[in-house]
Amino acid sequence: MREILQSSTGGANAGFAENILITLPQREPPEGYNRLVKRFPNYTFNFYALKEWDGLWTLILLKELLRHAAVLLVDWTLPNIEQVPNLKIVQLSCAGFDRVVKQPLYTDTKITFCTTLGILGYGSIGRQVARVANGLGMKIHAYTASPRPTPASKVDRGYILPGTGDQNGKLPDAWFSGIDKSSLHTFLSGVDVLVSSLLLTDSTRHMLSAAEFEILGKRNAYVVNALKVGLLAGASLDVTEPEPLPADSELWDMRNVVITPHIGSTGRGYARRVVDLLEASLGRLSTGESMFNIVQRGRGY
């Protein structure tokens, strides 16, 4: 741990009751943060912008705050269970949930945790992809694990940024579902471009392999997040396995591959959106409503 860049506190409470601890590798977004303090005067907010995560939870500075924290907003590094006896909710600032599933705070507690384009995983991310592609005149094929036969079942009930996504699930021209290879192959056989927006779990790891790429290859398809040499026309990779990608990987020299360093979520408004979601979650917590984007441990995301 090299340095804490910035810290600030806000809220009317003099004590530690209902503390909100925010630790992110971005500087505090003043407008959204100040709005939280004004809207929720019964909470005490503590914000720390950091350079490195290693050793974060061993800092003497944060130990007392962790002990009293009711809500924790982090990237993906979790404290030890005994450090957070009053914790109710953890909000992650990223969709890369696979980094968390083996940490004790997740496994040992019950704390509550977006031509034809095929979208593998039609959550909030997939729906925004569909919105953009639909504006370009593309046909949308969606794929989900469970069937969505009714209008109500197609609704996205997670947190949605205003003006984004496909909340009511009306954009797909066709909707496919299943957890078996046959259903997946039927879906893949009809797409020209495939976008995978699946979260990484034990059931989705290596979901696309030689057989799937062969099906895509018959249509000379372009695939985002996956590539098989000789079968696909091209790929754009923001996530690789392993990561970072070794210097001797042949992917670096391929003319039809674009590689970015796992920065797909990072943008100028990223910290602001994270704070907006925290505000919406605290609002629901205050009224006893169900939280947005709750992790279902049985499904792994």
Image (cartoon, rainbow, N blue to C red):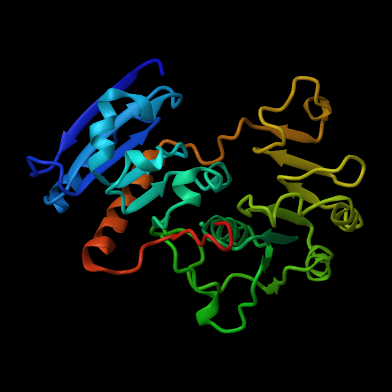
Task: Name the quadrant of the N terminus.
Answer: top left
**268 left or right of 168 in image:** left
Seen at 72% across and 36% down, the residue is 241
Q: Front-most of 26 and 205?
A: 205
Which quarter of the picture shows residue 193?
bottom right
Seen in the picture, residue 122 relative to 67 is either above or below; the reply is: below
- Work out which residue is located at the far front of the displayed protein and give it: 82
The residue positioned 40% from the left and 30% from the top of the image is 25
Q: Tell me the quarter of the image containing the C terminus.
A: bottom right
32 or 92, nearer to the observer:
92
Q: Is residue 269 visible?
A: no
Question: In this rendering, does residue 73 appear at all?
Answer: yes
Q: Is residue 14 above or below residue 129?
A: above
Image: 91 above or below 187: above
Task: Depth check: give the residue in front, 35 or 64.
Answer: 64
Left of 46 or right of it: where is 26? right
Residue 46 in the image, given as x and y percentages of width and height: 23, 36
Q: How many marks?
A: 0
At which x and y percent is residue 262?
60, 35
Among all residues in the image, which is located at the extreme top? 2
Residue at x 42%, y 60% (from the top left corner): 160
Res 8 → quadrant:
top left
Residue 107, percent from left and from top: 50, 51
Q: Please report the residue visible at 11 percent of the width from the left and 50 percent of the height from the top.
A: 41
Percent x, y for residue 91? 39, 49
279 or 195: nearer the viewer: 279
